[in-house]
Amino acid sequence: MGTALRVARSLGRKAMRWQLEEDMDRRVVEGSDAADARAAIELCDLALSKVDADVAEVFVLFELEGLSSPEIAASLEIPLGTVASRLRRAREQFRRVVTRLEIAMRREGTS
């Protein structure tokens, strides 16, 4: 599962890079936007690393890879209801982790 997550994340990053490379002139002008996007991706990776692996896999496939629930169920060979419950749990865990990270970042910014 870890390998699948890393591959999915890697493919997502490559797609982002290809999109940025097509807009090189805008990228130079909007350099801070590229840095912000890179920081957001790193923050997302950090948050996902703190989510349970079994639910994170479904989250990545649905939210980042854009697969439908039936496609995920077929590829992971799990029931459709399991996909739905794992996705719900993943979203809850992801929100909690991101909230904690935001609070920690605010504390660091005010210190």
Image (spheres, rainbow, N blue to C red):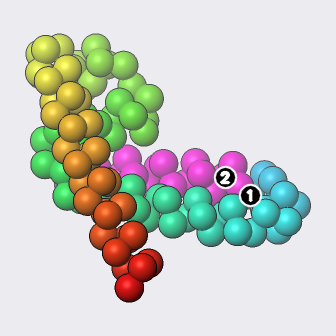
Residue underneath mark 1? 21
Residue 22 in the image: above or below residue 38: above
**Which residue is most to the front?**
110
Above or below residue 59? Residue 98 is: below
Q: Amino acid at mark 2?
A: Trp
Q: Give neighbour class at mark 2: few <14, some 14-19, many 20+ (Cα, 10 Å).
A: few
Range drawn in magenta:
1-20
Task: Identify the element where label 1 is drawn.
Answer: helix
Report the side of 75 relative to 110 (left or right). left
Horizontal side, residue 98 vs residue 64: left or right:
left
Which of the pair 28/7 is nearer the observer? Answer: 28
- Image coords of residue 17 (percent x, y): 63, 57
For the point 13% across and 14% down, which residue is it? 81
Confirm whether the magenta stretch covers residue 55: no
Q: Residue at x 39, y 70 (%)?
A: 106
Q: Quadrant of the C terminus?
A: bottom left
What is the x, y in percent for residue 52? Answer: 13, 48
Q: At label 1, which amino acid type do we have?
A: Glu
Looking at the picture, how far across and down is residue 8, in whole percent?
37, 47
Residue 57 shows in this picture: no
The quarter of the picture where residue 54 lies is: top left
Label 2's element?
A: helix
> What residue does disc 2 label?
18
Image side of residue 78 versus residue 108, left or right: left
Q: Residue at x 27, y 24 (%)?
A: 72
Task: Quote the CA–CA distance across marks 1 and 2.
Answer: 5 Å
> Does residue 82 sit above or below 48 in this rendering?
above
Labels 1 and 2 touching (C-beta < 8 A): yes
Q: Look at the image and tell me whether residue 67 can be seen.
A: yes
Mostly what secondary structure, the magenta segment? helix
